[in-house]
Image (cartoon, rainbow, N blue to C red):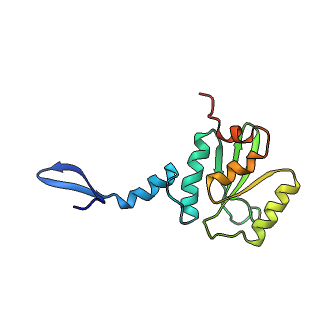
Amino acid sequence: MDNQTVVLAKKNKKEATTDMSKHRGEAGLMLGISEPKNEKEVTKSIIPKLRAHGWLCIRMQQNIGSHPGISDFICLKNGVLMFLELKGPKGKQNKQQKKFEEDINKAGGVYVLARKFEDIVERFSDDPGGYDFIMELPDE
């Protein structure tokens, strides 16, 4: 057994084990100690943090009848609506996504393109109390 394997239980003299390297990446993303490698991992690292800080995050799906280039998530907190587009480290917006961002900004909305949680914090840090607004915990 190597350092990547953990004994889960002993039953009938047999050991149940799991390869922790399969799970370490997800835990690291949640704790913010590893860098996401793709958009799926970016989503797993950002959305739970937003929800923990009181944001309602709704996943949007691009399909027939949806607005071209719509963001991946629409997030709401205390009356602030944020259109959130998530990208992996090398991901780029397509033309429709850039047009959607432009339309949201022209309408006075909040659009954030994020590869990490800090991108969202940075977007709000220019606003008075912005960092506190992102990070404050919801009322219990």
* Residue sticking out furthest to the top: 140
Q: Residue 12: x and y, percent?
A: 11, 51
Nearest the viewer among 107 and 2 is 2
* Residue sticking out furthest to the left: 13
Is residue 63 left or right of 33 when viewed as pictured? right
Q: Residue 57: x and y, percent?
A: 64, 47
Is residue 14 left or right of 31 when viewed as pictured? left
* Number of numbered markers: 0
Residue 5 visible in rendering: yes
Q: Which residue is pictured at 64% across the width and 40% down the height?
A: 135
Placement of 124 over or under 18, stated as above or below: above
Residue 74 visible in rendering: no
In the rendered image, the quadrant that contains the C terminus is top right
Nearest the viewer among 91 and 2 is 2
* Residue sticking out furthest to the right: 106
Q: Which residue is pictured at 62% across the width and 34% down the height?
A: 137
Q: Which residue is pictured at 84% across the width and 56% down the height?
A: 105
Is residue 32 left or right of 66 when viewed as pictured? left
Q: Residue 54: x and y, percent?
A: 63, 38
Q: Which residue is pictured at 65% across the width and 43% down the height?
A: 56
Q: Residue 129: x and y, percent?
A: 75, 37
In the rendered image, the quadrant that contains the N terminus is bottom left
Nearest the viewer among 66 and 105 is 105
Is residue 4 left or right of 52 when viewed as pictured? left
Placement of 121 over or under 89, stated as above or below: above
